[in-house]
Amino acid sequence: MTSAPSIPGYAKGYGIPGKMVDGQDVLAVYSAVQEAMAWARAGNGPSLIESQTFRYRQHALGMVIPQYSWNDLLDSWMARDPITLFGAKLIAEGTATEDELEAIKAKLVDEVEEAIQFGKDSPFPSPEEAYTENYGPDLVFDDEAEAQQA
Protein backbone atom coordinates (compact mmCIF):
# COMPACT_ATOMS: atom_id res chain seq x y z
CA MET A 1 0.00 0.00 0.00
CA THR A 2 1.25 3.46 -0.83
CA SER A 3 -0.17 6.95 -0.75
CA ALA A 4 0.44 7.23 -4.49
CA PRO A 5 -2.64 6.37 -6.57
CA SER A 6 -0.53 4.44 -9.09
CA ILE A 7 2.93 3.05 -9.70
CA PRO A 8 3.86 5.95 -12.02
CA GLY A 9 2.92 8.32 -9.19
CA TYR A 10 5.11 6.33 -6.82
CA ALA A 11 8.00 6.50 -9.32
CA LYS A 12 7.62 10.27 -9.51
CA GLY A 13 8.33 10.46 -5.79
CA TYR A 14 11.70 8.86 -6.44
CA GLY A 15 12.44 11.05 -9.44
CA ILE A 16 12.37 8.19 -11.91
CA PRO A 17 10.10 7.62 -14.91
CA GLY A 18 6.95 5.61 -14.45
CA LYS A 19 4.41 4.47 -16.98
CA MET A 20 0.98 2.89 -16.79
CA VAL A 21 0.14 0.43 -19.55
CA ASP A 22 -2.82 -1.77 -20.49
CA GLY A 23 -1.49 -5.18 -19.45
CA GLN A 24 -4.01 -6.90 -21.69
CA ASP A 25 -2.40 -5.32 -24.77
CA VAL A 26 0.68 -7.36 -25.73
CA LEU A 27 2.11 -4.67 -27.98
CA ALA A 28 1.57 -1.88 -25.43
CA VAL A 29 3.43 -3.91 -22.80
CA TYR A 30 6.22 -4.70 -25.27
CA SER A 31 6.58 -1.03 -26.17
CA ALA A 32 6.69 0.08 -22.53
CA VAL A 33 9.33 -2.52 -21.69
CA GLN A 34 11.41 -1.53 -24.73
CA GLU A 35 11.35 2.10 -23.55
CA ALA A 36 12.32 1.12 -20.01
CA MET A 37 15.18 -1.07 -21.25
CA ALA A 38 16.49 1.66 -23.54
CA TRP A 39 16.35 4.13 -20.64
CA ALA A 40 18.24 1.77 -18.33
CA ARG A 41 20.79 0.67 -20.94
CA ALA A 42 21.57 4.31 -21.68
CA GLY A 43 22.70 4.58 -18.08
CA ASN A 44 19.74 6.61 -16.88
CA GLY A 45 18.79 4.21 -14.09
CA PRO A 46 15.58 2.42 -13.22
CA SER A 47 11.99 3.09 -14.18
CA LEU A 48 8.69 1.53 -13.16
CA ILE A 49 5.91 0.08 -15.29
CA GLU A 50 2.42 -0.54 -13.98
CA SER A 51 0.84 -3.16 -16.18
CA GLN A 52 -2.87 -3.16 -15.46
CA THR A 53 -4.00 -6.72 -15.81
CA PHE A 54 -5.92 -9.39 -13.92
CA ARG A 55 -5.04 -12.70 -12.29
CA TYR A 56 -7.60 -15.24 -13.50
CA ARG A 57 -7.00 -17.62 -10.64
CA GLN A 58 -6.47 -17.35 -6.92
CA HIS A 59 -3.16 -15.97 -5.68
CA ALA A 60 -2.74 -19.15 -3.65
CA LEU A 61 -4.60 -22.44 -3.42
CA GLY A 62 -7.35 -22.46 -0.85
CA MET A 63 -8.12 -18.75 -0.94
CA VAL A 64 -11.79 -17.96 -0.68
CA ILE A 65 -13.05 -15.72 -3.45
CA PRO A 66 -16.40 -14.00 -2.95
CA GLN A 67 -18.57 -15.58 -5.63
CA TYR A 68 -21.13 -12.78 -5.64
CA SER A 69 -18.81 -10.60 -7.69
CA TRP A 70 -16.10 -12.93 -8.96
CA ASN A 71 -17.84 -14.46 -11.98
CA ASP A 72 -18.84 -11.13 -13.54
CA LEU A 73 -15.40 -9.66 -12.89
CA LEU A 74 -13.66 -12.71 -14.35
CA ASP A 75 -15.90 -12.69 -17.42
CA SER A 76 -15.18 -9.02 -18.08
CA TRP A 77 -11.40 -9.58 -17.94
CA MET A 78 -11.50 -12.85 -19.90
CA ALA A 79 -13.25 -10.97 -22.70
CA ARG A 80 -10.00 -9.00 -22.99
CA ASP A 81 -7.60 -11.94 -22.62
CA PRO A 82 -4.25 -10.79 -24.07
CA ILE A 83 -3.49 -14.07 -25.82
CA THR A 84 -6.90 -14.14 -27.48
CA LEU A 85 -6.74 -10.46 -28.45
CA PHE A 86 -3.23 -10.72 -29.88
CA GLY A 87 -4.12 -13.89 -31.78
CA ALA A 88 -7.14 -12.16 -33.31
CA LYS A 89 -4.92 -9.22 -34.30
CA LEU A 90 -2.39 -11.51 -35.98
CA ILE A 91 -5.17 -13.27 -37.91
CA ALA A 92 -6.86 -9.98 -38.91
CA GLU A 93 -3.54 -8.60 -40.20
CA GLY A 94 -2.81 -11.79 -42.12
CA THR A 95 0.35 -12.37 -40.09
CA ALA A 96 -0.84 -15.80 -38.94
CA THR A 97 -3.69 -18.20 -39.58
CA GLU A 98 -5.87 -19.81 -36.94
CA ASP A 99 -4.30 -23.18 -37.78
CA GLU A 100 -0.79 -21.76 -37.25
CA LEU A 101 -1.76 -20.32 -33.88
CA GLU A 102 -3.36 -23.61 -32.84
CA ALA A 103 -0.17 -25.45 -33.83
CA ILE A 104 1.88 -23.04 -31.69
CA LYS A 105 -0.50 -23.56 -28.77
CA ALA A 106 -0.30 -27.35 -29.10
CA LYS A 107 3.51 -27.20 -29.16
CA LEU A 108 3.56 -25.01 -26.05
CA VAL A 109 1.17 -27.33 -24.21
CA ASP A 110 3.49 -30.24 -25.05
CA GLU A 111 6.53 -28.30 -23.78
CA VAL A 112 4.78 -27.46 -20.51
CA GLU A 113 3.66 -31.06 -20.02
CA GLU A 114 7.24 -32.27 -20.67
CA ALA A 115 8.59 -29.74 -18.16
CA ILE A 116 6.06 -30.85 -15.55
CA GLN A 117 7.02 -34.48 -16.08
CA PHE A 118 10.72 -33.59 -15.89
CA GLY A 119 10.10 -31.91 -12.55
CA LYS A 120 8.16 -34.89 -11.23
CA ASP A 121 10.85 -37.31 -12.38
CA SER A 122 13.77 -35.25 -10.99
CA PRO A 123 15.19 -35.87 -7.54
CA PHE A 124 14.68 -33.23 -4.88
CA PRO A 125 17.69 -30.94 -4.52
CA SER A 126 19.67 -30.99 -1.31
CA PRO A 127 18.79 -28.31 1.26
CA GLU A 128 22.17 -26.67 0.60
CA GLU A 129 21.06 -25.85 -2.95
CA ALA A 130 18.76 -23.18 -1.50
CA TYR A 131 21.86 -21.09 -0.81
CA THR A 132 23.51 -21.35 -4.23
CA GLU A 133 23.19 -19.08 -7.25
CA ASN A 134 21.36 -16.39 -5.26
CA TYR A 135 23.87 -13.59 -5.80
CA GLY A 136 26.03 -12.29 -8.64
CA PRO A 137 29.27 -14.12 -7.72
CA ASP A 138 27.59 -17.47 -8.42
CA LEU A 139 26.59 -16.47 -11.95
CA VAL A 140 28.44 -18.27 -14.72
CA PHE A 141 28.96 -16.65 -18.12
CA ASP A 142 30.57 -17.90 -21.29
CA ASP A 143 32.66 -14.76 -21.63
CA GLU A 144 33.32 -11.34 -20.10
CA ALA A 145 31.12 -9.51 -22.65
CA GLU A 146 28.13 -11.64 -21.68
CA ALA A 147 28.81 -10.92 -17.99
CA GLN A 148 28.88 -7.17 -18.68
CA GLN A 149 25.41 -7.32 -20.28
CA ALA A 150 23.84 -9.07 -17.27
Image (cartoon, rainbow, N blue to C red):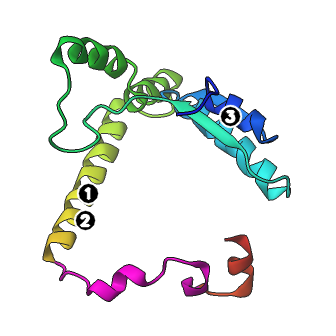
Q: Are marks 3 and 2 in contact (CB under 8 Å)?
A: no
In what element is the residue under mark 1? helix
The local crowd at label 1, few if under 14, some if 14 to 19, many if 20 or more residues have their Cα within 10 Å, is few
Q: Which mark is residue 133?
A: none
State the image quarter where residue 18 is shown.
Answer: top right
x, y percentage for residue 104?
Answer: 34, 46
Looking at this view, is 38 or 134 the one in front?
A: 134
Q: Which mark is residue 115?
A: 2
Q: In this picture, is 134 found above or below 137?
A: above
Q: In this picture, is 42 found above or below 63?
A: below
Q: In this picture, is 16 found above or below 127?
A: above
Cα separation between marks 3 and 1: 36 Å
x, y percentage for residue 98?
Answer: 34, 31
User: Does residue 131 show up magenta in the picture?
Assistant: yes
Cα separation between marks 3 and 2: 38 Å
In what element is the residue under mark 2? helix
The amino acid type found where label 1 is placed reads Val
66 sits to left or right of 29: left
Q: Which residue is mark 1?
A: 112
Q: Are marks 1 and 2 in contact (CB under 8 Å)?
A: yes
Q: Which residue is mark 3?
A: 10
Cα separation between marks 1 and 2: 5 Å
Magenta residue span = 122-140
